[in-house]
Image (cartoon, grey):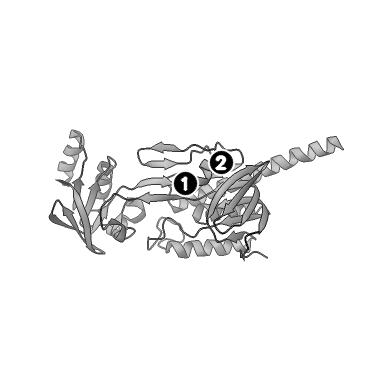
Amino acid sequence: MSHDMSYDMSYDMSYDVVVVGGATAGLSGAIALARSLRRVVVVDGGAPRNAPAGHAHNVLGREGTPPLELLAAGREEALAYGVEFVADRAVLARREGEEFVVETLRGAVIRARRMLLATGLVDELPDVPGLREFWGGSVLHCPFCHGYEVRGQRIGILGSRPSALHQALMFRQLSDDVTLFAQDLDIPAESSEQFEALGIRVLRGTVRSVSGVEGDLTVDLDGTPVGVQALVVTPYFRARSDLYAQLGGELGQNPMGEFVPTTFPGVTSVPGLWAAGNVTDIAAMVQASSAAGVLAGAHINGDLIAHDARAAVGARLSS
């Protein structure tokens, strides 16, 4: 019977596939594999990226569902198909012959023929006191994820990265009261013309802190208080990639962050290892991560089928 496992330091488990990460991509991949009668285990440290958010959006049929509620429902679905769970953080990964060996913080040793990495990413916010307290509420970054909820409000854009220029235009679609705090940011002449034409206010200086309450923030701009109802930031997106590096993989980078490079559908440079969700696609929203997990799971199943068919032929010829 499927279950959440408790184990001692000597517990040793073998599976077709180990999925590391129990959020949207990992659960979706695990379900796809379990529906093909694969023995699957999900190692989940219980720290989904979108936990600070009150609601998940652009989720067809479940619009506005709290993220943790959405994951709880997905977990129940996975359990119903026989997926097993280890509630722990995977800290070590290596190859032993044709198997992956994953070790957890509390000492579980898990062996699997294939591995799906769905560990997500970490949002590294600008170093401004007060931002973290409002992250996921009045401090946000994605106009598609939470922009509708701040439509028509006084919106500030913390211009700490060049992408803030694009964010200012994106959020201007949602409000006619947008202020760009141009902190160490060069603004090209074309952008300046666009901002002036669209009524986007530009304030130069350094944002020292953010304070207030949800929906009513005060931005300290070099000692001058500026009131906004929402503040847009650009985090640095850092993939949770320790296991990938331990297995010999090299990260990809772009101006927005770092990620595990893959080719469709989630194939990494490490044989037998797939990746899905924000660990490889830093812009993926919930639905995209779910789709990527399903595709990776289906491809892993196909890879196992092909391997076993070849092995069966080899065994028959040698008998």
Q: What element carries label 1?
A: helix
Question: The disc labelled 1 sits on which kind of residue?
Answer: Val
Front one among 160 and 316: 160
Rendering quarter of residue 224: bottom left
| Residue at x 63%, y 54% (from the top left corner) | 109
Q: Where is residue 263 in the image (x, y as percent from the top left)?
A: 52, 37
Q: Residues within 10 Å of mark 1 (few under 14, many from 20)?
A: many
Image quadrant where residue 1 sits: bottom right
Closer to us: 151 or 167: 167
State the image coordinates of residue 241 (x, y, percent, origin top left): 48, 45
Residue 306 seen in the current view:
yes
Q: Mark 1 points at which residue?
A: 279
The circle drawn on residue 247 is 2
Name the residue: 15% across, 56% down: 226
* Label 2 SS: loop
Please identify the quarter of the rendering in which residue 246 is found: top right
Residue at point 64%, 60% (across, down): 81
Lateral position of residue 231 relative to residue 9, left or right: left
x, y percentage for residue 233? 28, 50
